[in-house]
Image: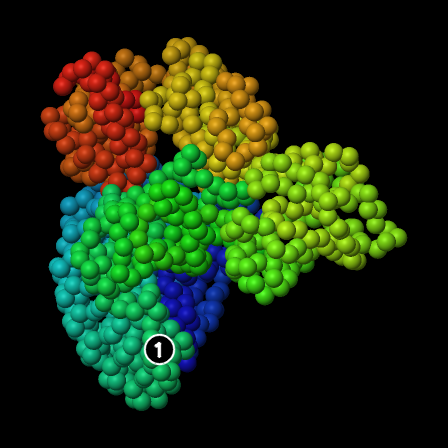
Amino acid sequence: MPDRNQLRSCRAFSSPCFVAGWLSSQLDGCFSGLSDENSLLPFTFTLTGITDYTNEGGCKEPPVSFSRLPCSGAASACPPGKSEHAWSPADRQQKMAKLQEPGDDLGEGILVAPELDGSRLAGNRLNLDVYPDGCHQFLDLFDKQKKEVTQVEFLRLNCNEDLIISTLAILPALRTLKSLILKGGHARDEFGACQRGSLTTLPPDFGNLMCLTHLDLSFNSFSSLPSCITHLANLSVLVVSHNCLVGLPEDFGHLTKLTDFFAIKNHFRDLPQSIGELVALKNLDLSENTLESLPEEIGNLYNCMELNLSGNRLTHVPDSLANLGSLHQLHLHSNLLVTVPASLANLPNLFRLDLQNNRLRYIPPEIQSKPFVHLRGNPLGEPEMPLTPDESSSGELQRLVLAPDENSFTVTPKGCKALLACGIRLYFPPGAATTSITIHFQTLVPDPQWVKLRHHDILLSKVLELQPHGLEFQQEVQICMPYASPQTIHEREVVVRTFSGQSWSDLGTKVEWKRKTKKHMALCSVPHFSWFLVISQLVENKCNVPREGTLLFSTVDPNIKVTFPPGVTEKPRTIRLQVLPVSPDDLKEIMGDPESRASPLLCLSQNSSLDFLRPVKVQLPLPPGVTGLDLTLDRSRVHLLHGDLQAQIWDDITDQVVLEFTHRYAIFEVTHFSWYWLWYTTKKYVSGIAKKVYERLRMYQVNFIALQRKKDPEQVLLQCVPKHKVDPVLKKLHDRYRGPEPSDMVEMFEGEQFFAAFERGINIDADRPDCMDGRLSFIFYSHLKNMKEIYVTSAMDRKDQAVKGQVSFYRGAVPENVPEDASRRRKGPDSHWLATLPIKLPKLKLRQGDPSNGFSFPPLNLGNEETGYLTQANLLSIARRIGADWQTIGLNLGLTYQQIERIGYNNREDLDRQILNMLFSWAQQNSEDQNCVEKLVIAMKESGRQDIADEIEAIIDLGRQKYRESIRRVGLDQGSSTEDSAIAMV
């Protein structure tokens, strides 16, 4: 019996698209085996018995025969002008691209390669998704060959192109269209993942395509199914996989001729009752959604042959599924099923029932006895165990998914699960709250003056603030925070740290890797709310030392042991041990001395200020390459160093303790704890050397990057990157940015401040909250993105020549626990210069209608003095950032589809003009609306441009602040200069 993958591949194999692709690979082999002379000749290829070869329990490659056709005259299939030359790979690729779409049959089982006449238009087919400018070509063809284009029946377009919205407006004119493929996923991001297309809606008259039978909208950004689709009365195949759909319209059942519906990887929670009206449906695939229940009407799909509901959250399925007499395959794996109807065993044509990876503890005997049932991954026969707090009542708890613009939600005594837009998850068990409570939350950028990192701590997340502060819950609330994964796992641990209002403390933390989201998550439980962040610290081993004594060793290096003898303390003490391994290569690079070596650095601390009553024995491994044999060990080179708690002062205590040596270890005794470090060196002043080495071990070697966007040189990306990440980062940015080579390597502390200043005629085109005295402020965190994109401008005239400026980087404040001498070396206004990189603003290309070419928009002030203004300059800056999202933003701002299309048509080939006309048309219509700024922010968020929304809000906040300051400055109750409230937008 064939399994599901075989059957799926068989169906795909029998499709014309697959056949054309398979033949392409076969033809490549044929071409590679022919001489240049023979490869001139066109040929036919014949497929025989495809159906016969897919009916007998598996897929087989169909027999294929090739025969040459005469290559002469106008009917020649050879490219024009190539009758005496071999076809190039590009010719063959172009030829095969035209075979990728089903067309009119030339005979049963026969496909003939179409002619390459130099046009993309081939008969009734138009395949433009394989070209990077397919939409542009479509618009050009429509202008030049409108009559022929309107007769096209098969059309493929790439929804990752900027002109797809403009192209979409023309499609309703193609009344004979039968097959339309509007797919995204043709472009990939820097991680190789498919990027969704930009489609979020369709024009209303799209429903007039009455000949349309096949529609593919997969890999786009639809959040709801456009209503016009339900008017396509002859539609038989609909593909909406890999979108953001949360449901189907109630009139979805109007598609009575629909035979295949694929909606894989969306966000469906339920289905409309009208799903049962799709009486012609044969294949229904709703896998990888979030369905929690199914309507009884699904049992009315009497012609359905394959039903795929895998990867959802179903706990049960309706008994009406037993009415699907035509069903061949039913896929229910990877759900939360606890029971299945026994009547499923009576389906007459069923040959596969997949129930794997559910929660089934009992299966009706009627089902269990069937050979086509798959049950692996179920706890069959196991007694029901008490569920963990995270699992209990999972089907009953309310599940809240917060949008990016939401900052609060309500928790009732019944509990809930909340998923924040930033990926943070909160779990409130039933009874955690005694009454309904409104929870407020926000994520904050870490401020080094507030977030106090300890030695060798690494920040892995932003700060999460949860309110109300101090409110005690009846049961602990679970917090699950995503974090940037540290590179070294063995010697470090991830913990959630919380702020009580006075100090930071660590919480018991569990870490998980979420395969579905591909994120590292840190989990902790708390009885009340405050501030939280995720850090990576040196692994901490701890124990309670009783009066009887004990032994503590390091899990990072088991050779490091601390032995507490009996009577070492009167009262139990808590001891903490941390180890910092020191690589010989790092030490050699720092010192330049191959003879100097050091052991791992040991930090011991306790919760008591009293010395121990008896000496504590400490065992350290000897430095690499050093053995304790009396004949080979030069004891004059061995130094035991003791550091204070801040590791700013290192003392050589070799002569103050009794050092014992074994073959591999050094053993000594102490009565109080701090840092200990064993060195083997010929250097005299070891303490000073150790201090410098320790300081270097805390620093990161970084490079600065300054790149300009290729399409908009005024948009500059600044980033501080650890040196081992420079090449991967540049590779990801190469396609979109250009600029000078990275700066020379410099060293920085975790949490150190630095500034970027534009010089020599280039200025920051903004009044930003993070801009201090004309310099852009950064805080360096090694595992977070130390990156900002800003717009720059120049007061110099760029009409005649380019402006050659630069950006320089300077040190700012250093963390408080940095050694004094290191901090002292960084004082002074410009004595801490780090690097300088060139920035060039090109000569302006004057275009008709460009604001810099004399064209100007009427003066605009959106908002008011108290809420803050958005001025004309602000809107111009916003427009520069919008890019290809302008149509979506315009629709979310309330402009009609006709207005959007008119703007696009009137400004063809000029994206800047399209954006400016859209934005200022809306602004002029809403200039009197006091809530227009809020509407603009909401539209940006709904369009997926949280970056622009955040900066607009920052502008408004700064505007309000300046307005209040101006009132206090002049002593007025109301009124202020609009100039104080106008903030230039980045």
**For the point 50% across and 48% down, which residue is it?**
536
Query: Which colouring convention does the figure follow?
Result: rainbow
The residue that mark 1 highlights is 385
- Locate residue 399, reporting x and y percent: 25, 59
**For the point 13% across and 19% down, which residue is it?**
974
- Locate residue 189, reporting x and y percent: 43, 45
Q: Nearer the viewer, residue 199 or 382?
A: 382
Name the image quarter holding the N terminus.
Answer: bottom left
Q: Is residue 701 above or below residue 55?
A: above
Judge from the rendering whether residue 419 lies leftward or rightward of residue 604; answer left or right: left
**For the point 73% across and 37% down, which residue is it?**
686
The kind of residue tagged 1 is Met
- Occupied quadrant, residue 823: top right
Judge from the rendering whether residue 313 lies leftward or rightward of residue 834; answer left or right: left
- Occupied quadrant, residue 103: bottom left
- Locate residue 81, reporting x and y percent: 49, 39
**For the point 30% across and 74% down, which residue is it?**
337
- Binning the other alpha carbons within 10 Å of mark 1 as few (below 14), some (14 to 19) or many (20 upward) gives few
Judge from the rendering whether residue 457 lies leftward or rightward of residue 270; answer left or right: right
Name the image quarter holding the C terminus.
Answer: top left
Q: Is residue 942 above or below residue 951?
A: below
